[in-house]
Image (cartoon, coloured by chain):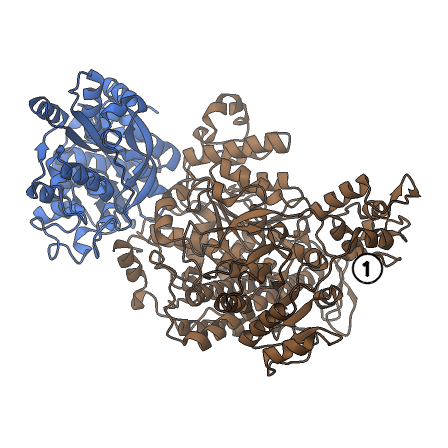
Chain colours: A blue, B brown
Amino acid sequence: METDTTNSISKQNLPVRELLQAIDKELPPNRKLRIMHVCGSHEHTVQRWGIRGLLPDGLEIFAGPGCPVCVCPVFEIREAITLARQGIMIATYGDMLRVPTPDGTLLDTNAEGADVRAVYGPMDAVRLASEHPDREVVFFSVGFETTIAPAAALISAGGLPENFSILTSHRLTPPAMELLLGIGDVHIDGFIAPGHVSVIIGADAWGIFPRAYQMPVVVAGFEPEGLLSGILLIIRQIKKGIARLENVYPQVVHAEGNPVALKAIRSAFDTVPAWWRGIGRIPRSGLVLKPHLSGLDARRRFGIGLSPERNELPPGCSCHLVMLGKIYPTECPLFNTRCTPATPYGPCMVSQEGTCLIWSKF
Amino acid sequence: MYFRWIIKEMERPEAKKSDGIGPGIADIRQWDMTLLERYPPRYHPVNRACSLCALGPCDLMGSRRGACGQALETFLSREALLIAVTGAAAHAAHAADIVERLLSEHGPDLALDLGEWVDLRMPIARIVTGVKPRRLGDLIPIMDYINAQIVRLLSAAHFGGESSYLDMESKTLHAGTMDILAMEIADVAQISGCGFPKGDPETPLVAVGEGEVPRHMPLILCVGHHSDVGRRILERIDKEGLDRGVVVAGLCCTAHDMARTKTQKCTPRIIGNMRDQLRFIRSGSADVVVVDQQCVRIDLLSEVLRTGAFFIATSDQSCAGLPDETCRDPEELASEIIDRPVRAVFISDPDRASGLAVAIARRYGRIAHPSDNEEIWKNAGPCNNCGLCTIHCPISLPVAKAVFALGGFVDGHRTADPSLTLTAKQTSAEITRLCLACGRCESACPKKIPVMTLIGSSNRTPAYAASMRVGRGPIDDYEIKDTGPSIVLGDIPGVVAFLACPEYHDSRDSLSWMARNLTERGYIVLAAGCAAMDIGIEMPYNQFSGIFKGGSVINCGSCVSSAHAIGALIKVASIFLHRDLDRNYAEIADYILNRVGAVAVMWGGITPKAFAASAGANRLGIPVIFGPQGHKFRRTLEGKGGRAPLFDARSGKPLTPCLAPSHLSVVSKTKEEALVQIVRLCIRPNDTTWGRQRKLRNYIELSEKLLSGMPDDLVDYIRIVEDLPEERREGLMHMLTGNWQPSFIPEPTLLKGLVRHGNGHNKFNI
């Protein structure tokens, strides 16, 4: 499917006020539309700029599973904790350090005497490995397509230190969106596709949704104008009774994505079914290192491989419902009471991309 | 405990208030009518003359009407209702017996405990009645409700009762609902009260078949459906340390449930299922036969007595014409029963009955006698090869040929040597493999030759040997969470439940053949009842995972454990999808029908219970495939090419034609046809393109391999080009010409009320 980037919106650069007026004007009467985005950064934009309050009645924008830290299953964090307790240096993104598990957090493990470091990306982890040739260094690589690409590029480049390995916990976004449509229990009238993921996988990767599900999809950036443009285009599609893929972020998102990154990802990873915390096992939604890279795979190198937990979320936690777009954070009885940014109870209150944390901040 | 919380939320008292236990006969009628519009009844008359009242028989051929005014289809639907109610009553009585006995043993406060990971304990009870039973006493009002419904359903079949055949069908479906509800109650009660496995996927393996039974020790054989007496016999033998001196075995579902009993020393042997009753009894291996209720041959008493064995009837539903000697002391009774002309008693107290069985076995040891070759030769002598036995065989086996050969006839002349000829051995072995052991050949024989005995005795090689996992009971909530997404998305192409009786028209290993083909293609195979034993013939359970996931083979347990197979599908809709359960029957059924690729197979289903269970499954949106005898239940429910309105819940657009699933109950003539039908009926409208590809790949490959050709309705299942299996897409593109138009993957529903029209209907339907 060809991505439509010829729409007038992306060229006109309409200001927020005009976009809101257009949305108000073009919103079909007597209908309640619900548009889902699947990106923590979009939720950040929505909350930070108060967009939800500016939208007219009859239009809702809500968050889906767009936070990789939130969906990282407990058993994979426990694997990292286990390795850290064995004296292995763990390097991972800062958000991961505070995600609660029944064994505590990675930060707690660090406080116990293990060596857990926050890094900005895989290159930092490699640097740590080079600086500590006498230590095993494991990069706990978490994230969606955006963070998969740097890890894959690193692997493709080769020349990694011998004491460096990777503990993968990567997830792919489109299968989760397909699941949401498949289960049919969430009212969705259109998708705002995440701009940065689309930079890697290309706008065309979302083509299955309008084509097979008649679900309008617009790839949008993270400024209010971009997001509102996306919403407006979805409304127009619904009004016309059509479903297609549009891109209002053509500055950086191309139809075919980043071929170099995609090639690196394909050469380094295999697609497998994967657990999403609180949601379950989603087919074809995870990546593991290819067999020929087993030397880099921390699970194989150190012989760990924990099974999925039966208790993925702590008692009373509604993060799974928040991630599926079934409730807003304020509908969780623990929100900002038992669960706060300072003392997070569920994973959505930890990550900067987590819906609960964003709602708590703004 | 995240799950706990979810379930507790679902179980919150204010979730749904009910005005007493329901629903009544007509309360789910609207869903029934919707279902029947999409899958209208197709009748298969066995008899076109009604004799249900004294004015009959009334010939109802063509447009004729009976004395009461009924037309043929009303009559046939009435017959179907009577069959279903009989089946439901049987399971209800069974459940009532279990609950009653456990109440007297443990009291009403016994917790209904199905294991640590089964919080959603009784999904069928939840969606039907809205009741959330937590203890044994909570089951009593549900049993009362079932009994009241069965009485009302029966009254509708009376002269001057229901006049509309569609309403009669609705009542048949209601009877089915009562049936599966009763099954759920029965199994949940016995799992909680008898210490049966609680959702354990790695239950022990047990051997099935008479070849496993030691012949030098007395054998107590328990036959039927209610394992209470059998369980007590096992416990008594354990307690008395007789495990090395007495063998305990079971037939049919009693055997299933005895194997689920935890004992220290005495392990029960599973002889087989209903199909083995006559043959095993006549082999003279059983010395004490203890009979409870249901699925017991009517002539079992006389058959047992002919072998010199003892017979103990234990259920008031099957007294066998024997005097009630419940008050007698078991030891005293055991000492005198040997001298009676009829070595049989009726003891209604399970404890005393078990005491008597053990006392007899201990006192008399091996006493039953099998036939020998000399007798075979003599008994078969009068055979003149008239062929009546073959004609009366329900599955047309060459019985006459075997009997003639057993008589020592070679090329038309009788040999002097009484040892069995090669032909006799070969033929009798083949018949033993296929025989239903119904005994109709004997009653047809003008020379009164004991055909069954001859064939059974001549073939000492165990006809039946299988390995089976002990029934695990429910599928746990965590497994559903793990697997639910894959089922709904079509990555696991389907859940196939093999249920019901073992009276197949073809060879006994047909179930394992189907199951193996399905597991190889990633389907989840569930089994319960007699079918669960036969699946193990050629595919031992230990070769497959017992966890609920693609490619697994799971034995839920006895006949009543079928409720767990059905319950697992309800759990998919509730645990993973957060659908409300309580008295939310139509929405859950609509969900299963349109989104959960599941099929039940009742290949040898012959009893009213099987039909009732099929009706219960149908009403929940689970298609059922019967073997060739299935049409004798009078009706099937077959779709007519998208005649009924299926909607897209997002847009409200009607989806026509949409054939998935194309039938709700259907008969297949061969196992090959059934296998193709299974994969076809697992297709659902909301499959992802990936899932649909996988399902169509199976459909195409199996059709080509087994039915010699491409399925002629393939194009009806192709919504967009990506639905075609990738590797064959290019070659199949020519099909997508002419009238084919691309459509889309809908959010399918038969319920207009679920169409959103953009009003956010199920926004927070948690």
When the figure is inspected, residue B256 is found, relative to residue B641, above or below; the finding is below
Chain holding disc 1: B
Q: Residue at x 65, y 46 (%)?
A: B508
Which quarter of the rendered picture does the C terminus of chain B lie within? bottom left
When the figure is inspected, residue B175 is found, relative to residue B669, above or below; the finding is below
Q: Is residue B278 left or right of residue A21?
A: right
> Is residue B711 something that shows in the picture?
no
Q: Considering depth in this image, is B502 or B218 the residue closer to the camera?
A: B218
When the figure is inspected, residue A55 is found, relative to residue B583, above or below; the finding is above
Q: Considering depth in this image, is A256 or B526 the residue closer to the camera?
A: B526
Could you say which quadrant of the image residue B426 lies in?
top right
Could you say which quadrant of the image residue B653 lies in?
top left
Q: Is residue B182 left or right of residue A56?
A: right
Q: Considering depth in this image, is B501 or B689 the residue closer to the camera?
A: B501
> Is residue B339 something that shows in the picture?
yes
Could you say which quadrant of the image residue B245 lies in?
bottom right
| Mark 1 crowd level (few <14, some 14–19, many ≥20, 10 Å Cα) | some
Furthest residue to the bottom?
A: B327
Q: How many marks?
A: 1
Q: Is residue B405 left or right of residue B81?
A: right
- Residue B202 coordinates in the image, percent (x, y): 42, 49
Q: Which residue is mark 1?
A: B443
- Residue A244 coordinates in the image, percent (x, y): 32, 31
- Residue B394 coordinates in the image, percent (x, y): 75, 52
- Residue B699 coordinates in the image, percent (x, y): 54, 34
Local secondary structure at mark 1: helix
When the figure is inspected, residue B351 is found, relative to residue A342, above or below; the finding is below
Which quarter of the rendered picture does the N terminus of chain B lie within? bottom left
Q: Residue at x 39, y 47 (%)?
A: B649
What type is the residue that disc 1 sits on? Ser
